[in-house]
Image (spheres, rainbow, N blue to C red):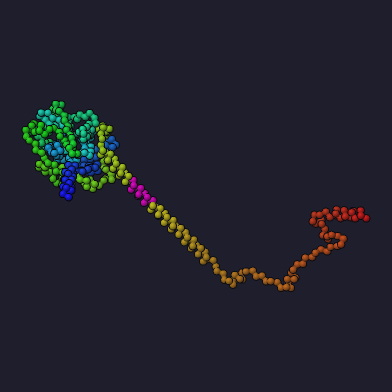
Amino acid sequence: MKKTIILITALFIFMSIKLDANPSFEVSFNFFYSSLRPYGEWIQLDNDLVVWHPNGIHNRWRPYSDGRWSWTSDGWYWDSYEPFGWVTYHYGRWYNDDYYGWIWIPDYDWAPAWVEWRYDDDYIGWAPLPPYASFEINFGIHFSIGWHSHFSYWNFVTYNRFCDHRINNYLLDDRRVSRIFENTRYRNNYYSNKDRIINGGIDKSFIERKAGYRIAEREITSIDNYRDYDRVRSERGERIYSYRPSDREVINERTADKYDIKQGDNRSTIEREKVRMPMSREWNRDQNIATDRNSERGRDVTVERNAARNDEGRIRSEVNRNNEKDQVRSNSERERSNVPRISRETQRERQPVYNQPDRRERSQTTERRIEPRRDSGSERSTPRSQRGERAPEKSSSKERSSERKR
């Protein structure tokens, strides 16, 4: 019995640790859409690629510029001060398009930051990973094309300002970045630990030596309720508040019947065939569902209208049929009412009266058929000439025969 209790307790502790290490946070395109819609516009590029563009940014704005870097158990974490930062700096990729400017392409995987690094002895820099970069557990960051980002994509600071609360105040301008960019070394250092993506970046001890001070590790407090996150995200303490929506919030988010997505004005410079974006497939699926839902509603409305029309026609035909029957019945009754009624006495008077004759009258009125008298010397008294016979010839032949006998 004791062994069973110990085994159950150990299993429970193990499951608790496992759950803490692997939170089952899931997101969807619909959740991203509703969360980012107040801060920018969604644009559809190249038929199936859907991106987001922030509003109210200036020409020199760059991603990962308004916030601070912190060392955590997940590596280098970008703590953004922008209201959309919990999405765009921990999910998806950024791309600087020649026509649209900076656009964000959604993706599922969460990380403390999605950036690539450059450094030398004096400066450290970072830039957002492009949509051609994907994370593989056994490999790290993999590029689908030979990628070399432009120096204008990068943010550079000196090492002693790298963990400052207001790092945007110490970013180098483009002219200085263009001079030091070619002399810096490139690095990206992503790996997984218990199903968590770690952003190793530049080694922490190396930065500490260059900065001249020790960097403390900050704790990440995950919040799954946006109201609580919005209330505490402005705090500038040693604790990091990271919002990762719970399954309940994602499920309770109502799926939009129709997304307010702008059609692109021009063709993007993104090499679409080199980008693997599951979010676009999900958006297309949601669009099909919404279209099917609308078509089903249309079919239901059409069926209901047709049924109503059929019922109305059936009712009208029955009413017309009943009216016709009533009309026929009323006409027949009217005709019957117009025909004068004849009494039995009048009918008897109108019938022809036949009086049977008396016997005396019957004898007088009876015609008597008189037969013609026959003579002994002749066969018939009625001449046969009236019947079309040749009587004279027969008589002469008889006479001749009688003479012969004599």
Q: Quadrant of residue 263?
A: top left
Would you place residue 2 above or below residue 188 in this image? Answer: below
Does residue 67 show up? no
Residue 155 placement (x, y as % from top left): 14, 33
* Of residues 272 and 57, the one drawn nearer to the viewer in this rendering: 272
Residue 247 placement (x, y as % from top left): 22, 46
Residue 331 placement (x, y as % from top left): 50, 62
- The residue drawn where x is 84% and y is 55% is 391
Q: How many marks?
A: 0
Please state, as top left, top right, bottom left or bottom right, where the C terminus lies in the image.
bottom right
Q: Give the left or right position of residue 179, taking residue 277 as reference.
A: left
Q: Residue furthest right?
A: 406
Q: Quadrant of residue 144?
A: top left
- The residue drawn where x is 79% and y is 65% is 370
The verdict on residue 303 being magenta is yes
The verdict on residue 319 being magenta is no
Q: Quadrant of residue 216?
A: top left
Does residue 75 show up? yes
Q: Main secondary structure of the magenta part?
A: helix
Would you place residue 301 above or below residue 75 in this image? Answer: below
* Of residues 227 and 330, the one drawn nearer to the viewer in this rendering: 227
Q: Give the left or right position of residue 404, taking residue 340 as reference.
A: right
- The residue drawn where x is 74% and y is 68% is 366
* Residue extent of the magenta highlight: 295-306
- The residue drawn where x is 40% and y is 53% is 310
Residue 173 placement (x, y as % from top left): 13, 31
Would you place residue 123 above or below residue 18 in this image? Answer: above
Q: Residue furthest left?
A: 212
